[in-house]
């Protein structure tokens, strides 16, 4: 293991110095598109200004015979488009595939100066991040890239979940982690066939009201993903990186998508993936704090003065701990407002 003193040294001669803190840039929705799909790629100029992150997906959902077309399509799209302050990410193929190495070689040398983050699927442990970390440093040096490309891991195997803390802290390049519920369900041998969301069979039933009478008993659907999201959020918070909910596959069920995204937001996630244009506004709505919550948080901060002691506001006790929660809400609102004039107005009203 390298010394802690070396953690912030570049891993290749001529590579940029690693970041010491993950820059917080709004990333409420990571919008996936398939660069080998001409119809989708043609929509990039209109979609890019509406999303915080645009991601050219090279992995699952791109068929094996389209992998090279997707890689070339992403290079062409990135070269043709000025993304303004929208981030450009890519999801490379998994490290056990024959495509991952060429994905990195091509993308970093051709469009590395425009790429903000490389999302790595099926990460199982720190060794996967170390492999990508060293390669990125070599390629950044070769291509003369002046700032480090960050790395985002998808948590989608049981082994990855077991090692989530070491993954989160594996490199100063680590930007964040997304939950990948579909691959994770398969890896765990869960009996679902969905992409995220609940399942009607995963429930708790109320006790019999009157044993022997067979009166109907209420049931409550439970959240299949609570444990993993909470674990991922803790690992990310402990290492100063950002947690995300991943994909919600029932595109037509916009209500359940919003619920899933909101659960993740409330638990600490900063964004989710949008797989279809209809999910962009859902993520934007959910991952931006409500104006009423921002106004309340500001009221608490004002009333708390130096942030210590206890006061009562509208019958609710406020103290050093509630004011910290309010700072989380206000800091997020201010970061989002700096990028989104509509939100800036809503938060000032
Ligand atoms: O109106 P038009 O025909 O011109 O365009 C369609 C369609 O092309 C377009 N569209 C998109 N544009 C940009 N980005 C997208 N992600 C996107 N999705 C669709 O919108 C118009 C309306 O589309 P539609 O409602 O007719 O939907 P389709 O049947 O065309 O496409 C639906 C799917 C789900 C297949 C499509 O949205 C898609 O492929 N999305 C991305 C899927 C993906 O990236 N999956 C991998 C991440 S999830 C994972 O790894 C674990 C499960
Ligand atoms: Mg996956």
Image (tube, grey):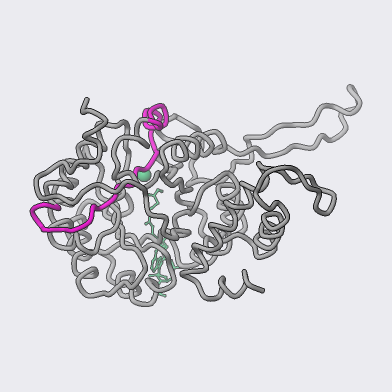
Where is 279 relative to 271, above or below? below
Q: Which residues are magenta?
A: 140-165
Quadrant containing the C terminus is: bottom right
Q: Is 284 on the left or on the right of 134, as rendered? A: right
The residue furthest top is 212
Q: Nearer the viewer, residue 327 or 161?
A: 327
Q: Is residue 259 left or right of residue 14?
A: right
Q: Is residue 72 positioned above or below 9 on the image? A: below
| Magenta stretch contains residue 85 | no
Please name the residue shown 14% across and 62% down the image: 110
Residue 157 magenta:
yes
- Along the line of sight, which residue is nearer the eye, 15 or 63? 15
Question: Which one is nearer the viewer's eye here, 267 or 279?
Answer: 267
Residue 190 location in percent, x, y?
A: 49, 32
Which residue is at 26% across, 30% downward? 4
* Above or below, comparing residue 245 to residue 131 in the picture: below
- Residue 332's x, y, as percent? 53, 57
- Percent across and percent down for residue 221 are 67, 39
């Amino acid at each position: 293991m390298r010394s802690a003193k070396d953690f912030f040294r570049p891993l290749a001669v001529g590579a940029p110095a690693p970041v010491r803190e993950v820059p917080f840039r709004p990333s409420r929705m990571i919008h996936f598109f398939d660069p080998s799909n001409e119809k989708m790629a043609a929509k990039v100029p209109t979609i890019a200004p509406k999303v915080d992150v645009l991601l050219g997906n090279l992995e699952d959902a791109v068929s094996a015979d389209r992998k090279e077309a997707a890689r070339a399509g992403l290079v062409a799209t990135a070269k043709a488009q000025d993304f303004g302050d929208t981030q450009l990410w890519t999801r490379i193929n998994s490290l056990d595939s024959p495509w991952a190495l060429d994905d990195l070689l091509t993308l970093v040398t051709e469009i590395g100066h425009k790429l903000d983050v490389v999302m790595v699927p099926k990460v199982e442990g720190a060794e996967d991040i170390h492999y990508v970390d060293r390669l990125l440093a070599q390629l950044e040096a070769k291509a003369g890239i002046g700032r480090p490309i960050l790395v985002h891991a998808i948590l989608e195997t049981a082994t990855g979940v077991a090692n989530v803390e070491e993954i989160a802290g594996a490199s100063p390049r680590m930007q964040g982690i997304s939950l990948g519920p579909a691959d994770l369900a398969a890896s765990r041998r869960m009996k679902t066939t969905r992409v995220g969301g609940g399942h009607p069979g995963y429930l708790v039933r109320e006790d019999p009201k009157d044993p022997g009478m067979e009166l109907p008993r209420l049931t409550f659907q439970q959240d299949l993903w609570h444990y993993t999201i909470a674990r991922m959020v803790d690992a990310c918070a402990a290492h100063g990186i950002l947690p995300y909910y991943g994909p919600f596959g029932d595109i037509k069920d916009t209500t359940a998508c919003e619920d899933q995204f909101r659960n993740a937001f409330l638990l600490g996630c900063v964004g989710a993936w949008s797989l279809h244009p209809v999910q962009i506004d859902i993520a934007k709505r959910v991952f931006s704090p409500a104006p009423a919550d921002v106004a309340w948080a500001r009221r608490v901060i004002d009333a708390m003065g130096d942030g210590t002691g206890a006061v009562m506001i509208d019958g609710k006790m406020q103290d050093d701990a509630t004011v910290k929660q309010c700072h989380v809400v206000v800091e997020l609102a201010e970061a989002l407002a700096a990028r989104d004039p509509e939100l800036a107005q809503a938060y000032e009203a």
